Image (cartoon, rainbow, N blue to C red):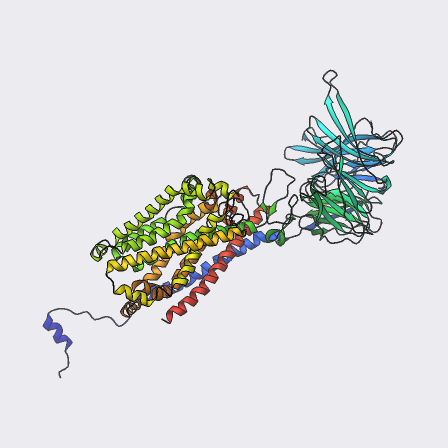
C-alpha cells in the first residue's frame, strides 16, 4: 500500500490543515507555574492568617489567668510607737496616709517618703476610747467611752483643687510628683493643683449605756441621704447589754441648727461581754451579728427596730480554734472569718425557706478553700470596689486574696517579724497595700491585680455567687449597683450557641436535604433550573434583615398563633404525605402532564392547606387540649399529655413502621403489580391511613400512660413562654441555613455518576430505591459537608440572635425562652467594654472559644467526610 502523502492531500483538498504544535507555549508554562505557586502561597497565607488570629486571641485573653504582681516596695520608719492604732487610711492617689489611735490622735504622713504632715485629731477631752468602730470605707467613726457615752465623727481625706497661681506658700518637694506645705499634699495636674488634706469632725456625746458602764464593743454604719443621714450603731457594754441605736439628724427650721435625735432598742443577749470578740452591723441596720471568741455567732433580725429577734445561731470555726478576725465583704452580705489557725472562710446567708431560722435564711460556709497563713489572722481589710481583701497574721504576713475565686493573689514580700502589724489598708483603687508595724515601720506595696475575679473555674465551672442558693453558671457582666460583682461564666453562652444551632438545624436539615433530593432526582431539569437559583437567592438576604423581620414580624405572629404553630409541625408532614398518595390516584397521562412545575405548585398548595388547617383548628385544639391558653399551659396550667403526644408522634411512626415492615414486604408489592394503577393507588392510600391511625393511636396511649406515671415535658424542653425565644430564632437561622445546605447537597447529589443510577435502574430498582441505596451513600461526604457548613453558619450567627432572642444568657433547654450565643455576646458587650479591662479580655476569650469550637467541628467534619469518600470510592 502506498504511503500517505500529506502534501498531496493538502493540494488535493485545496485547504490548509494546521498541525498541533508539539511544544508547549511559554505563556502556558508561565501561567501554570504562576497558578501553582500562587495557589500554594495563597493557601499558606490563609493558614498563617488563621493561626495569627488564634495567637492574637490567646495573647489578649491570657492575662485573665494572671494573679497579679507586686510592682514596687517601700519601707521606712515613722520614728514613733504605733500601739493603740485602731484605723489606718490612704487616699486613692496614694498622696496621704494616716492612722488613728484610741486617744483620738491622728498621725498623717506622705506614703511615698514617710514625711509627717500636720493633721487635726479628735478632741476626746482627755479620755481614751474603750471601743472603736468605723464604716467599711473608714471615713465615719465612732468612739465608745468608759462613762457609757459614744461620740460619732468624720475622719476623711479631702481632695480639693486650687489654681496654679498664686503658688501656695512654703511648698517643699517630697518626690517627683508631690509637694507639701506641712499641712497638705499638693500634686500638680493639668492647669491646677490637687490638694490632699485631713479633715476631722466630732459630734456631741450621746449617753447609750448606764452612767459609768463602759462601752466595750461597737459597730457603726451611716445610711440615708447626704442631706438627711441616718446613723446606726450597735453597742455592747460591760454588763453584757446589747443595744441598737439610730441617730437621725434634722434641721431645726426655727434655729437653723441641726438637731440629732437618738432612738435605742435593746437586743436580747445571754452571753457575757468578755466572751464577745466582735459585733457587726450592716448599713440598712436590719442585721446584727454577735461573734464569740469560740466562733459562735448570733444573728439578730432587726428589721423591726422595736423588736429585734434572734434569727439564727451558727458556729464558723471548729472546736479549739479561736475567732481572731471578722468583717463584712463589700456589699455587707458576706462575712470573712479569720481563725487562730490561720484559716480564712467566707459565709453568707442562703434562702433555704427553712423553719429552723425565723426568716428562712441559713448562714452557710460558701468559700472555705483558702490557703492557710502561718499564724493567727489578726486583721482583715476589704476592698471598696471588688471582692478582694487583705489578711494579716500575727507574724506580720500580709496576703491579698479574692473572695469568690478563693485565690491567694499575692503574698507581700519583706513583711515584719514577730512584732507584727497594727494596721493594714488596701488602697481605694486596689493598687497598693499599706501596713503599719508595731514599732512604727511603714510598708507600702504597689500592686497590680487587673483581673482578680477570673480563673478557669470561674469561666468554665460552677461558682457560688453571693445571693445564690447554690453554685451556678452565670453570665452577668454588669449590675444595678457598684457593689455587685461581675459574673463571667462562658458556659451559658456556649450552651446558647449550641441551643440555637441545634434547634435551627432540626428545621433546616430535613427541608434542605429533602429539597435537594427532590430537585436532583425527581424533577425535570427545566424545573431544577428554576428552583435552584431561587433557593440560592435566599442566601443573599442579609442576616440583619432576617433578624429584623423575625423580631418585629415573625415573633408576634408566633406568639399570637403559638398553638397553630405547634400543631403545624405535625399537620404539614402528614398533609404532604397524604397529598403524595392522593397524587397517585391521578391517571398516568394526567400525572405525567402535570409533572414538573405544576406538581411543585400542587405541593405548595398542600402546604398552604396544611397551614390553613392548623390556623383554623388552632383555637379549638388550644381549648380542648391546652386548657384554653397555650402560654398559660407552658407555665404549668393543665395536663402535659397533649404536648407529650406531639413529641412521641415521630417515634411512634418509626416503631409502627418497623412493626408493619414484614406486612408490607415484597409479596405485598407484587400484589400491587397485579392491580390497575388506580386500584393500587387506592390500596396505598388506605394502607397509609391505617398506618397513620395506628401510629397516632400508639403515640396517644403512650402519652396517656406516661402522664399517669408523672412524666411532663414542661420544666425541660417546654417551659414558660417568652416572645423572643429559641423557636423564633430557629425559624430565622434555618431560613439562612437552608440555601447553604440545599445548594451543597444538591451539587453533591448531581455529581454522582450517571452510570450508577443507570445500573441500579437496569437491575429493576425504582427511582426512590436508587436514590436511597445508591445516590445518597455515594454523595454522603458532600451532604455531610453541607450539614457541617450549615452548623458553622448557625454557630457564628450574630445579628439574627441579637435581634430575635432577647439575649438572655440562661442555661435552659426550653424552646420557648431566649438565649445568648458567644457571637451575640461579643456584639452586645464589646462596645461598652473598656480596653484591657476584665470584660474586654473575657470577650476575646469568647472569641477564642468560638474559634476553637468551629475549628474542632470542621476538623471532625473533615475526618468523617474522608471516611465517606473512601466508602464511596469503593462503589
Residue 858 horizontal/vertical position (percent): 46, 60
Foreground pick, 36 / 600:
600
Foreground pick, 21 / 821:
821
How many badges with numbers are in the image?
0
Residue placed at 64% from the left, 43% from the top?
Answer: 485
**Left or right for 128, reference 824:** right
Quadrant, the C terminus: bottom left
Q: Residue furthest right?
A: 212
Foreground pick, 812 / 626:
626
Q: Residue furthest top?
A: 254
Residue 289, by quadrant, is: top right
Residue 767, by quadrant, is: bottom left
Residue 254 horizontal/vertical position (percent): 73, 15
Residue placed at 55% from the left, 41% from the top?
Answer: 832
Residue 809 horizontal/vertical position (percent): 54, 46
Question: In this view of the protein, can residue 204 be seen by the observer?
Answer: yes
Quadrant, the N terminus: bottom left
Above/below status of 114 relative to 738:
above
Q: Residue furthest bottom?
A: 1
Residue 786, by quadrant, is: bottom left
**Left or right for 830, reference 337:** left
Residue 3 horizontal/vertical position (percent): 15, 81
Question: In this view of the protein, can residue 445 be seen by the observer?
Answer: no
**Left or right for 154, reference 32:** right
Amino acid at each position: 500500500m502506498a504511503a500517505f502523502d500529506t502534501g498531496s492531500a493538502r493540494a488535493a483538498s485545496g485547504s490548509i490543515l494546521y498541525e498541533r504544535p508539539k511544544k508547549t507555549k511559554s505563556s502556558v508554562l508561565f501561567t501554570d507555574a504562576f497558578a501553582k505557586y500562587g495557589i500554594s502561597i495563597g493557601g499558606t497565607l490563609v493558614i498563617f492568617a488563621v493561626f495569627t488570629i488564634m495567637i492574637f486571641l490567646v495573647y489578649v485573653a491570657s492575662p485573665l489567668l494572671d494573679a497579679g504582681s507586686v510592682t514596687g516596695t517601700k519601707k521606712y520608719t515613722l520614728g514613733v510607737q504605733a500601739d493603740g492604732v485602731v484605723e489606718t487610711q490612704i487616699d486613692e492617689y496614694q498622696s496621704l496616709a494616716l492612722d488613728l489611735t484610741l486617744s483620738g490622735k491622728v498621725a498623717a504622713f506622705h506614703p511615698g517618703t514617710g514625711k509627717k504632715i500636720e493633721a487635726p485629731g479628735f478632741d476626746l477631752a482627755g479620755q481614751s476610747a474603750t471601743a472603736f468602730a468605723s464604716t467599711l470605707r473608714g471615713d465615719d467613726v465612732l468612739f465608745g467611752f468608759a462613762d457609757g457615752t459614744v461620740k460619732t465623727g468624720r475622719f476623711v481625706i479631702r481632695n480639693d483643687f486650687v489654681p496654679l497661681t498664686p503658688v501656695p506658700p512654703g511648698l517643699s518637694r517630697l518626690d517627683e510628683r508631690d509637694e507639701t506645705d506641712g499641712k497638705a499634699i499638693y500634686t500638680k495636674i493639668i492647669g491646677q493643683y490637687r490638694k490632699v488634706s485631713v479633715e476631722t469632725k466630732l459630734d456631741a456625746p450621746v449617753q447609750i449605756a448606764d452612767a459609768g458602764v463602759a462601752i466595750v464593743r461597737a459597730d457603726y454604719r451611716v445610711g440615708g441621704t447626704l442631706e438627711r443621714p441616718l446613723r446606726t450603731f450597735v453597742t455592747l457594754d460591760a454588763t453584757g447589754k446589747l443595744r441598737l441605736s439610730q441617730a437621725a439628724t434634722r434641721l431645726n427650721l426655727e434655729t437653723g441648727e441641726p438637731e440629732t435625735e437618738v432612738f435605742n432598742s435593746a437586743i436580747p443577749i445571754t452571753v457575757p461581754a468578755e466572751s464577745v470578740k466582735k459585733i457587726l452591723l450592716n448599713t440598712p441596720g436590719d442585721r446584727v451579728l454577735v461573734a464569740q471568741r469560740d466562733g459562735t455567732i448570733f444573728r439578730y433580725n432587726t428589721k423591726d427596730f422595736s423588736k429585734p429577734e434572734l434569727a439564727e445561731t451558727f458556729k464558723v470555726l471548729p472546736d479549739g480554734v479561736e475567732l481572731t478576725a471578722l468583717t463584712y465583704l463589700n456589699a455587707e452580705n458576706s462575712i470573712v472569718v479569720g481563725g487562730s489557725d490561720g484559716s480564712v472562710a467566707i459565709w453568707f446567708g442562703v434562702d433555704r425557706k427553712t423553719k429552723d431560722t425565723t426568716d428562712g435564711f441559713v448562714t452557710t460556709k460558701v468559700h472555705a478553700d483558702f490557703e492557710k497563713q502561718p499564724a493567727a489572722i489578726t486583721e482583715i481589710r476589704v476592698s471598696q470596689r471588688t471582692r478582694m481583701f487583705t489578711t494579716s497574721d500575727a507574724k506580720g504576713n500580709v496576703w491579698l486574696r479574692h473572695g469568690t475565686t478563693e485565690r491567694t493573689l499575692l503574698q507581700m514580700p519583706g513583711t515584719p517579724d514577730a512584732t507584727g502589724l497594727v494596721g493594714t489598708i488596701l488602697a481605694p483603687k486596689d493598687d497598693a497595700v499599706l501596713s503599719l508595724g508595731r514599732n512604727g515601720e511603714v510598708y507600702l506595696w504597689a500592686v497590680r491585680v487587673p483581673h482578680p475575679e477570673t480563673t478557669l473555674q470561674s469561666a468554665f465551672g460552677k461558682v457560688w455567687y453571693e445571693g445564690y442558693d447554690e453554685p451556678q453558671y452565670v453570665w452577668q457582666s454588669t449590675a444595678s449597683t457598684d457593689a455587685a460583682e461581675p459574673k463571667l461564666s462562658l458556659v451559658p453562652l456556649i450552651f446558647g450557641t449550641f441551643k440555637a444551632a441545634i434547634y435551627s438545624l432540626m428545621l433546616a436539615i430535613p427541608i434542605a436535604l429533602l429539597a435537594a433530593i427532590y430537585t436532583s432526582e425527581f424533577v425535570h431539569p427545566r424545573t431544577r433550573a428554576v428552583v435552584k437559583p431561587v433557593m440560592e437567592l435566599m442566601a443573599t438576604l442579609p442576616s440583619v434583615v432576617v433578624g429584623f423581620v423575625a423580631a418585629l414580624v415573625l415573633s408576634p405572629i408566633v406568639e399570637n398563633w403559638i398553638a397553630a404553630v405547634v400543631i403545624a409541625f405535625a399537620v404539614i408532614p402528614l398533609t404532604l404525605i397524604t397529598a403524595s398518595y392522593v397524587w397517585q390516584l391521578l391517571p398516568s397521562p394526567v400525572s405525567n402532564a402535570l409533572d414538573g412545575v405544576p406538581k411543585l405548585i400542587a405541593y405548595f398548595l398542600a402546604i398552604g392547606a396544611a397551614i390553613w388547617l392548623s390556623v383554623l383548628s388552632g383555637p379549638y385544639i388550644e381549648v380542648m387540649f391546652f386548657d384554653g391558653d397555650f402560654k398559660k399551659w407552658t407555665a404549668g396550667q393543665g395536663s402535659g399529655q397533649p404536648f407529650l403526644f406531639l413529641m412521641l408522634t415521630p417515634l411512634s411512626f418509626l416503631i409502627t413502621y418497623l412493626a408493619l415492615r414484614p406486612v408490607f414486604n415484597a409479596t405485598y408489592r407484587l400484589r400491587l403489580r397485579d392491580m390497575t394503577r388506580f386500584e393500587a393507588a387506592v390500596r396505598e392510600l388506605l394502607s397509609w391511613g391505617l398506618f397513620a391511625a395506628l401510629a397516632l393511636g400508639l403515640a396517644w396511649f403512650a402519652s396517656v400512660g406516661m402522664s399517669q406515671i408523672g412524666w411532663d415535658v414542661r420544666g425541660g424542653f417546654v417551659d414558660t413562654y417568652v416572645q423572643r425565644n429559641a423557636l423564633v430564632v430557629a425559624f430565622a437561622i434555618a431560613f439562612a441555613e437552608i440555601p447553604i445546605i440545599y445548594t451543597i447537597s444538591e451539587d453533591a447529589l448531581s455529581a454522582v455518576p450517571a452510570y450508577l443510577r443507570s445500573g441500579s435502574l437496569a437491575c429493576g430498582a425504582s427511582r426512590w430505591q436508587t436514590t436511597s441505596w445508591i445516590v445518597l451513600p455515594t454523595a454522603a461526604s458532600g451532604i455531610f459537608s453541607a450539614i457541617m457548613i450549615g452548623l458553622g453558619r448557625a454557630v457564628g450567627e450574630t445579628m439574627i440572635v441579637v435581634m430575635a432572642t432577647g439575649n438572655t444568657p440562661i442555661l435552659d433547654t426550653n424552646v420557648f425562652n431566649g438565649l445568648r450565643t458567644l457571637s451575640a455576646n461579643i456584639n452586645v458587650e464589646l462596645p461598652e467594654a473598656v480596653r484591657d479591662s476584665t470584660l474586654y479580655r473575657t470577650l476575646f476569650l469568647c472569641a477564642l472559644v468560638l474559634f476553637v469550637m468551629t475549628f474542632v467541628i470542621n476538623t471532625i467534619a473533615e475526618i468523617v467526610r474522608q471516611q465517606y469518600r473512601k466508602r464511596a470510592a469503593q462503589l
